[in-house]
Image (cartoon, helix red, strand yellow):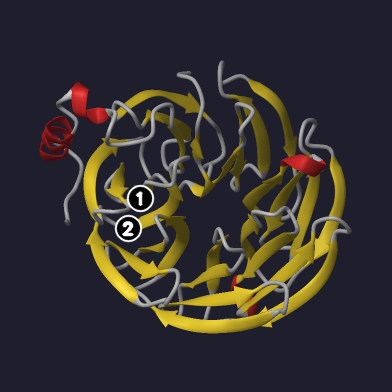
Amino acid sequence: MHWRPGLAAATRRLTLWVLPSLVATVVAAGDFAYVTNQNSDDVSVLDLETGTELRRVPVAGKPAGIVVDERGRYYTVSPDSKTVRRFDAATDGVLAEITLDGGPMGIALDRSRGHVFVSDWYEARVRVLHADTLAPIAALQTGSAPAGLAVSPDGRWLACAERDADAVSIFDLGTLSSVHRLPVGSRPFGLAFAPDGRLFVGNVGSDDVSVIDPVAGEVLATVPVGARPYGVAFAAGRAFVSNQYADTVSVLDLATLAAVATIDVGEYPEGIDSTVDDTRIVVANWFSNSVSVIDATLLEVIGEIGTGDGPRAFGRFVMGGEER
């Protein structure tokens, strides 16, 4: 699927989402996507049940990083203005904000300990902030150009992709101490923990994914995918990897790491996440100004929703809950 947004895209969206009686089976009820649009300085709030963009929230400074929590809050990182903001999802009001030095980029949340983590691209560190006030707490040293961040499902680990160091650092969330630093492929950028605790890292320079055991501190496998893998998400026993240059999503079987399918999406897919019930994958297409919704069982695109200009959605951006 290679296209530019316009009348054809609008017609496609209407076709894919035309029957309300069927929409409830398409995505988990109550799921919303908060998609950072870097070029238009805003966040698109998407209703994944109806396949519509509900509104756009102005966010200055070219927002890229995003993380949502289960309590109806979302956090954004604007690299150009070096600003981190915490929003109320019910009102889209700014609850807290802070301007940081360096180069804030990726973001992750440890709600149980009340910490937000922000990678600092220029200063080779991860900033630790208070989850409510965004006040600085600590700084964790990393390799060069830290980008993507991820918190493990069991709340034990924080992982950081160090793009220019070709490495990944793993920190103990309880002590905020470094426990492993591992070489991976070339230019790792996005990463995510699978439900079983393994860490999957997209290496944009070597067109592959490194699979890591965070406990042993060991790279278990290196799996080829499409051109310029950016982000990773999981659903239905599979890993889904967005490939920027290929305009595709690679699908890997979690048990065997074998390639299962390659799915065509919009142009230059970047941020990728799963719905709350893990039956659908949502991927932001930067050049197409849209998100594609993939059925994780059928392995096909079942919907497409327009966004603002330049959707990045770099992080965890799908939130469950009542309609907002």
Q: Are marks 2 and 1 in contact (CB under 8 Å)?
A: yes
> Which quarter of the figure is the N terminus placed in?
bottom left
Q: Is residue 52 above or below residue 180?
A: above
Q: Earlier in the sequence, mark 2 or mark 1?
A: 2
Q: Depth check: 253 or 274 in front?
A: 253
Disc 2 residue type (three-letter) = Tyr
Residue 214, how many percent across, how many down?
69, 72
Q: Is residue 18 above or below residue 135?
A: above
Instruction: Answer left or right for 140 relative to 111.
Output: right
Q: Quadrant of residue 162?
A: bottom right
Instruction: Answer left or right for 114 relative to 263.
Output: right
- Which element carries disc 2, helix, strand or loop? loop
Disc 1 residue type (three-letter) = Trp
Residue 316, how many percent across, how many down?
54, 46
Residue 14, how many percent across, how many down?
15, 30
Q: Which residue is mark 1?
A: 286
Instruction: Answer left or right for 64 relative to 117.
Output: left
Q: Depth check: 110 or 29 in front?
A: 29
Q: Which mark, by number, is residue 268?
A: 2
- Counting the numbered discs, the total is 2
Q: CA distance from mark 2 to mark 1?
A: 5 Å
| Residue drawn at 65 percent across, 49 percent down | 108
| Residue drawn at 32 percent across, 58 percent down | 268
Q: Is residue 76 above or below residue 284?
A: above
Q: Depth check: 279 or 63 in front?
A: 279
Q: Is residue 183 visible?
A: no
Q: Residues within 10 Å of mark 2 (few under 14, many from 20)?
A: many
| Residue drawn at 70 percent across, 51 percent down | 118
- Quick one: which residue is furthest to the top in this view? 91
